[in-house]
Image (cartoon, grey):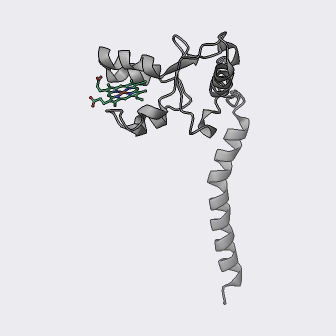
């Protein structure tokens, strides 16, 4: 049965609810109601009855449940007969208004560059001086505690 958004009937509204859920990225919780959506043309396919028959196995289909599988499908180079078969599992379209828009890329915050090298210089001096001071202290202790 084909259910399109804007159609009528109870089945339509049930399918629409499921589609809306998938588009919000919570498809995983509806494991028994598998759908593949193609964002390019916003089509949703319920491949539940096709899982056992799929020549590529059920795992690949399960891996893209509730996600945009357009690229995965195209990457395989499915034959025209495979593309014709899809019509059998077409159940509707994605309500694009429910799909979250892509978030703008915000580069990670980097520590600001500090042109003041003073603290770095002090650390280097200390790294050099502290061992010498310890050595000197050891010699001093040895010198003053030496039995005559
Ligand atoms: C309703 C959707 C789909 C239908 C009707 C379908 C149908 C088919 C058919 C008929 C084949 C046999 C080869 C051919 O004729 O091209 C096939 C193979 C395959 N399909 Fe799908 N497929 C669907 C979705 C997907 C998706 C979404 C993926 C990946 C995530 C996928 C991955 C594969 C793989 C890996 C093979 C095996 C290719 C090989 O062994 O060369 N299929 N599919």
**Figure quadrant of residue 3:** top right
- Vertical placement of 76 versus 29: above or below? above
Frontmost residue, 123 versus 88: 88
Q: Is residue 102 visible?
A: yes
- Vertical placement of 92 versus 123: above or below? above
Residue sitting at x 70%, y 13%: 97
Task: Give x and y (percent) for residue 130.
Answer: 67, 58
Q: Looking at this view, name the residue that lies furthest to the bottom.
A: 148
Frontmost residue, 55 versus 148: 55
**Figure quadrant of residue 10:** top right
The answer to whether residue 57 is left or right of residue 36 is left
Residue sitting at x 65%, y 33%: 26
Task: Give x and y (percent) for residue 104.
Answer: 66, 17
Frontmost residue, 54 versus 129: 54
Task: Give x and y (percent) for residue 24.
Answer: 67, 26
**Displayed-image quarter of ligand 1:** top left
Frontmost residue, 57 versus 107: 57
Residue sitting at x 68%, y 46%: 123
- Which image quarter holds the C terminus? bottom right
Q: Is residue 100 visible?
A: no
Residue sitting at x 34%, y 20%: 82
Task: Give x and y (percent) for residue 15.
Answer: 63, 24
Total number of numbered discs in the rendering: 0
The answer to whether residue 134 is left or right of residue 77 is right
**Figure quadrant of residue 67:** top right
């Amino acid at each position: 049965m084909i259910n399109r958004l804007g159609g009528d009937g109870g089945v339509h509204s049930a399918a629409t609810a499921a589609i809306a859920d998938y588009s919000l990225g919570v498809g995983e919780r509806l494991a028994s109601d598998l759908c593949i959506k193609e964002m390019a043309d916003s089509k949703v396919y319920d491949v539940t009855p096709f899982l056992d028959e799929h020549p590529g196995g059920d795992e690949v289909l399960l891996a893209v449940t509730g996600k945009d599988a357009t690229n995965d499908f195209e990457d395989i180079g499915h034959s025209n007969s495979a593309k014709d078969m899809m019509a059998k599992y077409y159940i509707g379209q994605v309500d694009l208004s429910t799909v979250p828009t892509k978030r703008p890329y915000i580069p990670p915050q980097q520590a600001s560059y500090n042109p003041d090298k003073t603290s770095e210089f002090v650390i280097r001096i200390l790294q050099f001086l502290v061992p010498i001071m310890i050595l000197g202290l050891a010699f001093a202790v040895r010198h003053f505690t030496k039995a005559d």
